[in-house]
Image (cartoon, rainbow, N blue to C red):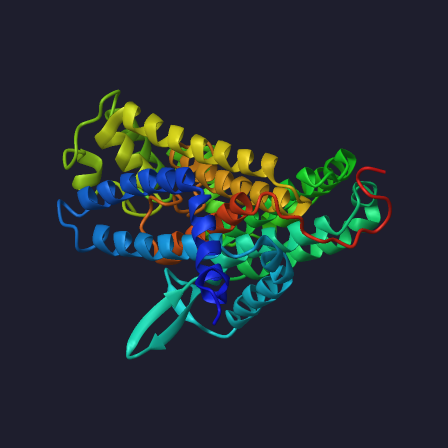
Amino acid sequence: MVALSTHPLASGTRLIGDKLANMAWGLLFLLALVAGFGFLMLYSAAGGDWRPWALPQIMRFGAGVLLFLAIAVINIRHVHRWAYVIYAGALALLVAMEIPGVSGVGVQRWIQVTLGGMKFQFQPSELMKFAVVLALARYYHSLALNVARRWTSLPVPLFLILLPSVLVVRQPDLGTGLLMVAGGIALMFLAGVRKRWFIAGFSAVVGMAPVVWYALLPYQRERVLTFLNPNLDPLGAGYHIQQSKIALGSGAVWGKGLFNGTQSQLNFLPEKHTDFIFTMLAEELGLIGALGLILLYCFIVLYGVGVASRASSQFGRLLALGIVSTFFLYVFSNIAMVTGLIPVVGLPLPLVSFGGTAMVTLMMAFGLLASVHVHRDTEVPRHTTGRTFGA
């Protein structure tokens, strides 16, 4: 008779219990606090009604928490093994978008799936931005530092970044495509690629600026011109940013209070529950509320950097840094957009803006970050090319 302590089921249960005991509960707590800001603002945006936006968002966050915990207990070696497969799957979904999908705001960004008579919409680009991080982390994990610095190591990561980015821009979704490139380049820098290659790339982009300008769609050019001169068309292309600035200023230090924001509650502020939700928060909760949310975002980024610093493997370090870098870029871009520091590019505020795919995929990505934390002492085998790091 097999003793209970040696039974495979008991061993597996004990193993999962140990992993849950070492879970990144602090990270999950910070994510819940940020999401709480979102629930509150969605409740206010609907005029005190939970049903339109807040309740669905709470349910999505709940599903995201379950995925977070499920992914966190997966051994980091398995994540490494399946990194390219996940990338290929996300890329296949983007390619499928070339076949007409579900239209949203005049673009093709969603795939519609019907399960049990219920229709679900999924945005592949949200999954792709973290799949790129996974693929790059695995690629650079297999290289010695001296090899990663050579120009011969550049074609593969550039291909991994640019191929999905081009497909996303074609949807068209210029903002997500550009940030996908920025996140990938940030990870290349963290992996040790020489600075001169970034300088050369930046110079090439500057030289291509006229070509890029004429390749932009009319509404994209209009956004850039409006950014340079918001008063150019205050009732048309400049309306969004003008109303956003009015709302930001009127909130002052302490805000006007929930349901009392004139720009948001009287519907002067467009997309108040999605892209411009930070503006609504600043109007109703003031500078104090806005800084409080930004501080929580900073804590999440610092937590991720701490996880990366304690990881035993290069794959774990790069995966953690790639996730928090991508997260930071989206937070920064949304806040910079609504405050007029960059052109309006239509990006949601992570964990706060209303949106199902963005919420669930972000929680999955943070589940990967938690997996790096839980398995921080786990070595990930790598087949290096060239000398090792310690050589």
Judged left or right of residue 196, residue 220 is left
Place residue 322 in its image quadrant. top right
Residue 77 figure quarter: bottom right
Q: Position of residue 342 (x, y in %)?
A: 48, 35
Query: Eyeballing the image, is 136 above or below 102?
Result: above
Q: Residue at x 83, y 51 (%)?
A: 385
Q: Quadrant of residue 113?
A: bottom left
Q: Position of residue 391 (x, y in %)?
A: 85, 38
Q: Residue furthest front?
A: 1
Taking 114 as reference, is 256 above or below it?
Answer: above
Q: Is residue 15 left or right of residue 181?
A: left
Residue 233 visible here: no
Residue drawn 33% across and 46% down? 353
Q: Give residue 359's position: percent from left, percent from top.
A: 38, 52
Most foreground residue, 129 or 65: 65
Point 14% across, 45% down: residue: 47
Left or right, 170 with reference to 363: right
Position of 349 with respect to 342 (left or right) is left
State whether residue 286 appears in this view: yes
